[in-house]
Structure formats: structure tokens, C-alpha cells
Amino acid sequence: MMFNSVLPLALLASLAAADYRCATNAGSFTITNDIAKAAVANGGTNTKTSSRFPHGFAGMSGNGTPGDHLHKGTQLKFYGADSRCNEKQDDDPEKSNLLEFPVFQNGKSFNKDEKRDKGVLTPARVVYVKSDMTLCGVMTHAVKNTDGSGEGDFRVCDSN
């Protein structure tokens, strides 16, 4: 009988510790769970930074135009994540309960206090709950440019 209650808990624990496989036009790459968690910790909850990251995320895929991912496209789903990660968000990013923050495959930290003149040189973002920094998952722009930046719609990275 105890085995029946332990197995679901073990399954949930394995889902929570999954790595993320992201696919773009340039191929696929992996963000480890540890790197994703470190990016959430680095991002924090202060949205008034020089880089403009982290910022609110409305849960939408976007339509390929910079900024439009805040309120256009289709609703993204983070399977196996906290239910708050998949709730409909306000179109106003300042009112969103979710934040997005750049994450690099190699674990490099994004400097949120540095003003950016160019795009962020990674297509990937962590998405997390603003109130308690619960990691929802990782998403990536569909297009990875030659400089490493991303553009176009967002898609959720598979957890494996």
C-alpha cells in the first residue's frame, strides 16, 4: 500500500528536476534544471532594471513581432508545472503574475542591471511566478539568429 503512495511522489519529484530541451530553426539545445533555477534566482522580482528584465509575461506565444508575445498568439502551456503557470494572465505586463528572464545554455548569468543596445544573445527564457519565484519552465524564440539572439514566436521547451 505504501508503494502506491510513494510512486506518484517520486514521479512528481522527477518532473520537478527535469532538464529542458529547446528547439529552434538552428537545432536543439538543453537548459539544465540547475541553470534554469539559477536564472530565476538571478532574475528576482524587481522589474525596474536597466535591461528591462525580468518583465511580465502574459503567457502567450506572440506573433513574431518584438513585444507582441505579451498579449498575442496562443496560450503557452507548461505541462507538469504549478497551476499558476498556466492561468490566463493580464495583457498589461505590469499586472502579470508571471515573469520572464533570459537564460543561457552554458549557465552564464544575464546582467539585468546593464542597459542593452542590442538584443539578448540567447533565445531562451525562464518563466516563473512573480510572488514566490516558482519555476514554470523554459521557453525559446522559434528563431535563433547567428549572434545567438532570438526572435519570433515563443515555444515551450520540453522537459525530459
Image: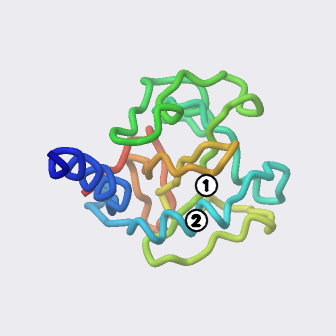
Q: x and y percent of residue 68 in the render?
A: 59, 31
Colour approach in the figure: rainbow
Residue 101 marker: 1
Q: Which of these two is toward me, 94 or 25?
A: 94
- Residue at 55 percent across and 78 percent down: it is 108
Location of residue 116 by image quarter: bottom right
**CB atoms at circles 1 and 2 under 8 Å apart?**
yes
Q: Amino acid at mark 2?
A: Ala
Q: Is residue 45 left or right of residue 59?
A: right
Q: Nearer the viewer, residue 153 or 35?
A: 35
Mark 2 nearby-residue class (10 Å; few <14, some 14–19, many ≥20):
many
Task: Pick whichever of labels 1 and 2 is earlier in the sequence.
Answer: 2
Q: Looking at the image, which is closer to me, 57 or 36?
A: 36
Q: Is residue 80 above or below residue 62?
A: below
Mark carried by residue 39: 2
Q: Is residue 95 left or right of residue 125?
A: right
Secondary structure of the residue carrying tag 2 is helix
User: Residue 24, image x and y in percent?
Assistant: 32, 53
Give left or right: position of 156 versus 148.
Answer: left
* Position of 86 relative to 138 (above/below): above
Measure how far apart labels 1 and 2 are at the Cα level: 7 Å
Say which element carries label 1.
Answer: strand
Marks counted in the figure total: 2
Quadrant containing the N terminus in the rendered view: top left
- Please state, as top left, top right, bottom left or bottom right, where the C terminus lies in the image: bottom left
Q: For this rendering, which residue is in front, 12 or 63?
A: 12
Q: Position of residue 99 (x, y in %)?
A: 64, 44
Mark in front: 1 vs 2: 2
Q: Residue at x 46, y 39 (%)?
A: 82
Residue type, label 1: Phe
Residue visible at 50% across and 69% down in the picture: 104
